[in-house]
Amino acid sequence: MSSSVIWSFLAGIILIYTLFAAPLALWFFRPPARRVLITLLGLAIALAGMHIVFTRQGKSLWSWLFNLDIEFTAGAVYSSLQYTLIALAALLNAIVTPSLKIGQRLYWGLLSALFTWLCLDEFLSLHESFLHWRSAYALGGLALAASSLAMFWFGFKDQVDLFVPLIVGLAMIGAAGVALDALTNDHPLIVAGMQVKWVNLLSCNAPYIPLECRHMNQLGFVEEFLEMTGAALVLATFVNYLDTAPEKAGLRLFRCLSAGAVAAWLAIWIGKMWAVPTLDAAIGTEPIQVEYLDGRLAATGYRISGEVFNPGDDVMLTIFFRVKAPLREDYRLSTHLMPRYGADSLAQADTELGGWIYPTSAWIPGLSVRERMLIHIPEDAPAPASYWLTMRVWHEGQDVPLSGTDRFEVGPGTVVVISLPVLPQGDIPDPPTAAGYRFSDGFWLTGYSIPRSVAPGGTLSLRFWWKTEARIPFEINQFVHLFDAKGQVALTYDQAPFGGERFPTVDWPAGMEAVADWEIPLAASLEPGTYDVYTGLYTLPNIQRREVFDAQGQPVPDNAIYLGQITVEAD
């Protein structure tokens, strides 16, 4: 659809609105209310014009900022501010207007509550969480219209100057918010389970409508424009009502509150979109360096929703991004939960960076953006173990290559954000043999189990009960040695305490209590007899044994813990 057609369409809408609003303003409004209406209409026209200009120039900060079809932009803030001012005016009418009956004050209070909801909904899109919101809003609008007509007849019959423009303004808001939204977004309008077919008279499929259906969505801004202008008429009506009070105390108070509302909404908008994420990134994150596009896009920090997790838990991963220069494209983020050095993903979450409300093409250089990813740990995930949370950025189905990173790269463009400890749920069983061996690095061997006998060529099954006081900043290996009756080493077996790469000590959380199971294969040539079993720990790569003390605080000789004897029985 050409720009001239869209401009002509907007001009036609403005002309029709003027033909309706001008007589109402001249017949019913005093000068202050007329000035309010003209000012609000001018702002709405300016926003609609900037929407047409910038959204047709490609992706940029300005095309996002003045896009009336999405939330959290200038248009959404303006509409929310309008609804806030309407709610304030209605509340003041309920409180300060003299000689009102209880029913009349309740009606003004109802209007104030309604527009308070609408101001929050306009900014936060609360209606999107309801499956049949159009039906609910249509029925609510009909109920409001009916109650307004009843209130006029029974309570305000002598105040035509209040209810005529009010009903017209409410009708514009309702028709734009429900019917036009259904048309421009190609949704049928369903009310109470029944399709409202009269809206099809304006459908692109109607033979007398000169618009192709593929162009209908380009007119979505008209819905927002009519909501704004309808709200302008309602607000001017309420201001006019305040102006009719003899002492005009409500009008003076409204002017003061209006200035505060403007400042508050600007602070909320700037805070939510830019100030709070940037401050959060500076003081509340773990630093990370993952750069894309020659450093123009970078992940600078992250935060995880906990330190220890169980199978079946949800993990909230928050990653902070920043751009150094404006981007012309919108990028997506994918996060995966994977076993360490594994190829299969156990869970994943994908999203557009910044979400559809704030895509990367609109990001302001130097300011941080938060991206929250919710990942579910499968109920059957093996534990105890640690899992990698990985991230990659992609665009149009292709991974975006890394420009630089301080993280481990596990695939093209994919890095490990954090290694996540996952422990089994519930309490661990008591060990058959309790112990109290304390290692100088801040963890304990609190028990173990060892069989009485094994067979040559069989398997030596051991279990170790570990408890930590603090995190361990380095990787530790564990050894098991068997000594024969002559004191000669008959078997050595070394691995990480939980075997392989499954749960390295650098991932052990503080306060952990977990059981490690060992299965040591025995040589078929192992001589029958009695063997002493020892275990201990050492660091890599320097092969230095970790200092350990017994329950009495005495150093363990050679830092090798005696576990007991086993008998290797002949077949």
Image (cartoon, grey):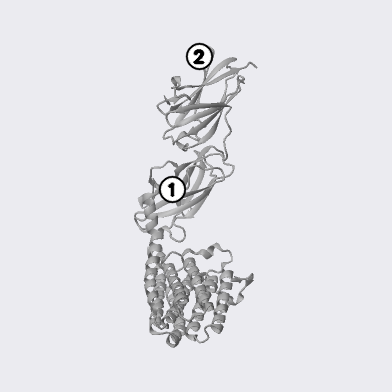
Q: Amino acid at mark 2?
A: Gln
- Helix, strand, or loop for circle 2? loop
Q: Is residue 327 visible?
A: no
| Residue in view at x 51 percent, y 64 percent | 126
Q: Position of residue 370 (x, y in %)?
A: 42, 54
- Pointer 1: residues within 10 angstroms few (<14), some, or many (20+)? some
| Residue in view at x 59 percent, y 14 percent | 529
- Helix, strand, or loop for circle 1? strand
Residue identifier under label 2: 488
Q: Amino acid at mark 1?
A: Arg
Q: In the figure, 415 relative to 71: above or below?
A: above
Q: In the figure, 525 relative to 323: above or below?
A: above
Residue identifier under label 1: 303
Q: Quadrant of residue 415?
A: top left
Which of the two discs, 2 and 1, sits closer to the camera?
A: 1
Q: Position of residue 320 (x, y in %)?
A: 41, 51
Pick the front one: 59 or 362? 362
Q: CA distance from mark 2 to mark 1?
A: 51 Å
Q: Position of residue 104 (x, y in %)?
A: 52, 78
Pick the front one: 398 or 299? 299
- Location of the C terminus by quadrant is top right
Q: Position of residue 310 (x, y in %)?
A: 54, 42
Left or right placement of residue 17 versus residue 522 in this view:
left
In primary-sequence order, the first of circles 2 and 1 is 1
